[in-house]
Amino acid sequence: MNRIFLLFLLLSGMVLAHAEYKSSTPAANATIKTMPKTVVVNFSIAVETRLSTFKVYPLEAPPEAWGSPARLRRLAGPLVRQVLPLKNDAARRADTGITTTARTSKTVTLALKPGLQPGVYVVMWKNLGVDGHPETDFFVFVYKP
């Protein structure tokens, strides 16, 4: 019985160790009046920044959907699956890449391009946690001056 309990604790700890989204600036589902110069994403554990992918993309969404985080998330899902694996897509992106210089970090900062238009933006990633587990996720925010 003790072995089963110890195995359960060990496996539970491994599951909890993934580098999961904790918070961000702008916050997930936020509507902001001023576009920031950067997006900052905080994770539960450090990620291998050079072995991870982070992107910000504009999302074509009708203005009536801007107030519905659930609808925006549904609209963003296909975009994330389509563009996250792409290479050489800098012209389509709203970011210029990560500015975090540490090899591993719990916080990743992406610089945004100047002059971005009002609309919905999707922050997406496929990270590799220092625990060796990959995690793919995204969030949206609305820029409405």
Image: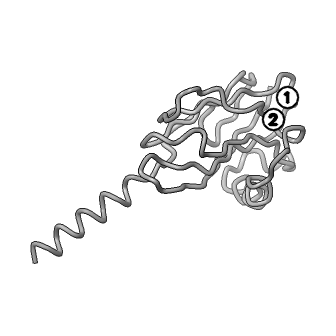
Residue at position x 77%, y 45% in the image: 66
Where disc 2 sits, the SS reads: loop
* Other-residue count near label 1 (Cα within 10 Å), few / some / many at <14 / 14–19 / ≥20: some
Q: In which quarter of the image is residue 92?
A: top right
Q: Residue 37 carries which label?
A: none
- Residue extending farthest to the left is 2
How much space separates mark 1 and mark 2, taking CA atoms?
A: 7 Å
**Vertical order, 4 against 27 (above or below):** below
Quadrant that contains the N terminus = bottom left
Q: Which residue is identified by label 2?
A: 94
Q: Position of residue 35 (x, y in %)?
A: 75, 24
Q: Quadrant of residue 79?
A: bottom right
Q: Where is residue 67 in the image (x, y as percent from the top left)?
A: 73, 45
- Residue extending farthest to the bottom is 1
Q: Quadrant of residue 109?
A: top right
Viewer-side residue, 54 vs 21: 54
Amino acid type at mark 1? Leu
| First of labels 1, 2 by sequence position | 2
Residue at position x 84%, y 50% in the image: 61
Amino acid type at mark 2? Ala
Quadrant that contains the C terminus = top right
Q: Where is residue 46 in the image (x, y as percent from the top left)?
A: 45, 39
Q: Which residue is identified by label 1?
A: 116
Where disc 1 sits, the SS reads: loop
